[in-house]
Image (tube, rainbow, N blue to C red):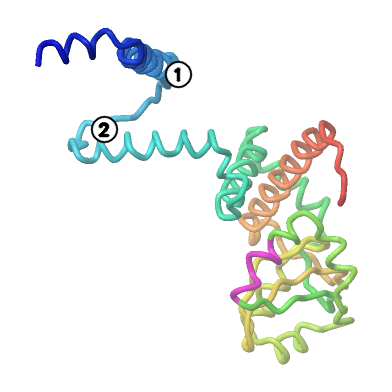
Amino acid sequence: MIKIAEKFIKEPLVHFLLLGAILYIYYAQQSSENILTQKDSQEKIITVQKDLNSTEEEVRRKIYDAILLQEAYALELEKHDTLITTRLIEKMESVLLASKRFEEPSEAALLEYYKKNIAEYSTVKSIDLSYIKIEKEQREKIERIIAVAPEIIAQKMPKLLSQTPAELESRFGRYFSHIVLRERSKIWSGVIAAKDGNYLIYINKKVVGEPMAFDLIEDRVYRDYKAEFLQRVRNEAYKKLEQNYKVELL
């Protein structure tokens, strides 16, 4: 038995196999160490806000969410998800609106705005408007388009010419007429409920009579003043961004 073992050990093929096994074990160990070193060098730091009342399991969930979110950004998954891109666009619109701080106007400033836009604060004899009837599944899509191309959409819509307040009320209902007659011209309204559904409207022109007293509608003047300011801020901030881009339509 000993002689067979000695003969076996002296075989060159055995020497080759033993050397190969030793080298395999050595390089496998080195490779493992390299992977660990590489992992350490690529370690990422995340910051997780821990509230005073957070439980251990809530903290673990926050860490889990933060890590997966970072990996999702690394894979650019947000670029392929319309829900995520929509939310990011909405957040960016908030950033645009916050690019210039709104300062509360004085009564003199509101009075000046009232006089400058006196037609908007006068009794309405007739009104020319465009409208879109909104279904629930269409609302978000149409509102998003209208936000950036209001005048183009208005030009494509049929006009209801010379509708008196009585005609508006008869066709759409009292509430609809009450709201529309107080909407500003040349902008799209929010969604307005009528007796046969919901509408977006765009006032092209008003024929007006006597102005309403400033003291009675000061709160309405304030809302219009602020809304116009925010719209102007958003438009100006967007135009600055737009200058940095070259758009190619495919």
* 139 drawn magenta: yes
Camera-nearest residue between 225 and 3: 3
Q: Is residue 133 above or below residue 104?
A: below
List x then y, in percent, for residue 87: 56, 49
Rendered residue at 39%/35% (across/down): 66
Which of 214/5 is in front?
5
Horizontally, residue 64 falls left or right of residue 165, namely left
Query: Where residue 91 sits in the image (x, y, percent)?
Result: 58, 43
Residues in magenta?
A: 136-143
Alpha-carbon span between mark 2 and mark 1: 28 Å
Q: Residues within 10 Å of mark 1 (few under 14, many from 20)?
A: few
Q: Quadrant of residue 132?
A: bottom right
Callout 2: few (<14), some (14-19), or many (20+) C-alpha neighbours within 10 Å? few
Which of the labelled discs sits on residue 51, or is there none? Answer: 2
Secondary structure under tag 1 reads loop
Would you name the residue on which mark 1 appears? 42
Judge left or right: residue 153 versus residue 71.
right
| Count of residue discs | 2
Magenta stretch prevailing secondary structure? helix
Q: Amino acid at mark 2?
A: Asp
Q: Residue furthest left?
A: 1
Q: Secondary structure at mark 2?
A: loop
- Where residue 9 appears, as percent x and y from the top left, is 23, 10
Residue type, label 1? Gln
Residue in view at x 81 percent, y 55 percent: 117
**Residue under the point 65% across and 87% down:** 173
